[in-house]
Image: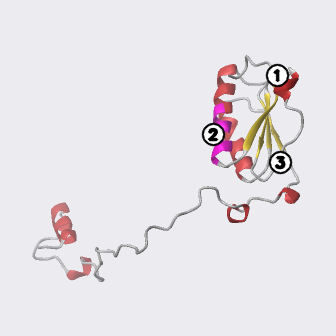
Amino acid sequence: MANPLKKTFVFLGLADEEDYDERYAPTAAVNTTAAAPRGGAQVTPMRPTRASKGAPLPSAMNEIVTVHPKAYADARIIAENFREGIPVIMNLSQMTEHDAKRLIDFASGLTLGLFGSIDRVTSQVFLLSPESVAVSGDDAANTGEVDRTFVN
């Protein structure tokens, strides 16, 4: 009784030692010794190209999504749109300060993970732009328009 599968069937009471049939045994032998690859492991580039990610090209962008989240659970809507390569404007004016900070932390991680960027438009409005979208204009933080007490 050297077969571990047979031992398991017998232990669980699904088969007797004498009645064990070879129909439960594996039909093909499994090679447990895999040959090590020669020349080292294949390395994947850290920053994928746009063509490999399937992200839309800047000329193909035709929409921007504006989200007015009321609770942290609305982060899913933001993430799904951003993952599709659509820029997202988050207006956090309807959220509590605690939930708004959590959502900003989430959005920061989302943009970092997908090589995008997050920009503050006003004190409670943020723009999440994918890697394929370039954002230009005056920095709101330099104009004095932004209240720095909202987010550290």
Q: Under tag 2, what secondary structure?
A: helix
Front-most of residues 93 and 116: 116
Asked if the residue at tag 2 contacts the one at tag 3, i.e. Cβ–Cβ closer than 8 Å, the answer is: no
Amino acid type, callout 2 = Gly
User: Is 96 covered by the magenta stretch?
Assistant: no
Q: Under tag 3, what secondary structure?
A: loop
Q: Which residues are the magenta region?
A: 105-113
Q: Which mark is residue 128?
A: none
- List the single residue furthest toward the top: 149
Q: Which mark is residue 134?
A: 3
Tell me which label, 1 or 2, sits earlier in the chain: 2
Labels 3, 2: front one: 3
Residue 14 lies left or right of residue 133; in this view the side is: left
Tell me which label, 1 or 3, sits earlier in the chain: 3
Q: Quadrant of the C terminus?
A: top right
Asked if the residue at tag 3 contacts the one at tag 1, i.e. Cβ–Cβ closer than 8 Å, the answer is: no
Residue 118 lies left or right of residue 18; in this view the side is: right
Amino acid type, callout 1 = Val
Q: Which mark is residue 109?
A: 2
Real-space Cα distance between discs 3 and 2?
19 Å
Tell me if residue 110 comes above or below residue 16 in the rendering. Answer: above
Which of the colour schemes (rainbow, by chain, secondary structure, one colour) is used? secondary structure
The residue that label 1 is drawn on is 146
Q: Classify residue 28 by image quadrant.
A: bottom left
Image coordinates for residue 103, horizontal then vertical, percent: 67, 32
Image coordinates for residue 126, horizontal then vertical, percent: 78, 33
Determine crowd level at label 3: few under 14, some 14-19, many 20+ residues with C-alpha closer than 10 A: few
Image coordinates for residue 10, horizontal then vertical, percent: 16, 67
Tell me if residue 50 comes above or below residue 88 in the rendering. Answer: below
User: Is 112 covered by the magenta stretch?
Assistant: yes
